[in-house]
Image (spheres, rainbow, N blue to C red):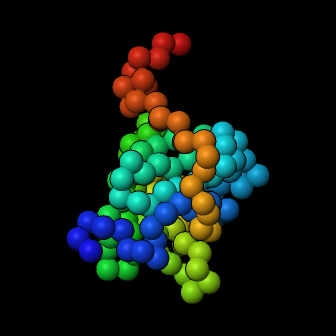
Amino acid sequence: MADKDIPYEYYGWWRIIETSQWANAHIDIIGTALISLTGYDDRLRMFALLAHVNCRPTKTGVSFTWKGAWEYDQVSGSVRLRKDGRLAGRIRIKGRDESTFIAERVEEPNEPIPEPPSYRDKWRRRW
């Protein structure tokens, strides 16, 4: 396995089932809340967030950054595998909120997660 390969126990698609700071009732508002950890064209979707994920293995799990649309702020996070087989994750929005999340392993969705809006769209939008 190369240094940049995602460890087998983390590799694949994960269904985000809850967060610690945000209203879980709306977690699937734009589609099933998912994160992929494959090391290739990874995506994240939850609440009103669509993002490309750049993940890399660490000594204790997998860390990630993303580019996408959560009010266009820089966001990072990390995940570790719990004893029950679920992922325990943390999301940090630069200069703003931080939340933990729990995810369960699922099959790759039939419908791809849409492309996230560009950061530049923030500046193109006129009120």
The residue under the point 58% across, 80% down is 85
Is residue 4 toward the left or the right of residue 73 in the image? left
Q: Can you name the residue that lies furthest to the left here?
A: 3
On the question of residue 66 being in view, the answer is no
The residue under the point 70% across, 42% down is 29
Can you give x and y, in whole percent of width and height, for residue 53 in the image?
A: 40, 51
The residue under the point 23% across, 70% down is 2
Res 52 → quadrant? top left
The residue under the point 71% across, 53% down is 23
Res 120 → quadrant? top left
Q: Nearer the viewer, residue 91 or 98?
A: 91
On the question of residue 76 being in view, the answer is yes
Is residue 47 toward the left or the right of residue 25 in the image? left
Q: Is residue 62 above or below residue 98?
A: below
Can you give x and y, in whole percent of width and height, for residue 3 in the image?
A: 23, 71
Q: Is residue 98 above or below residue 94?
A: below
Can you give x and y, in whole percent of width and height, for residue 48 in the image?
A: 60, 40
Q: Can you name the residue that lies furthest to the front here?
A: 110
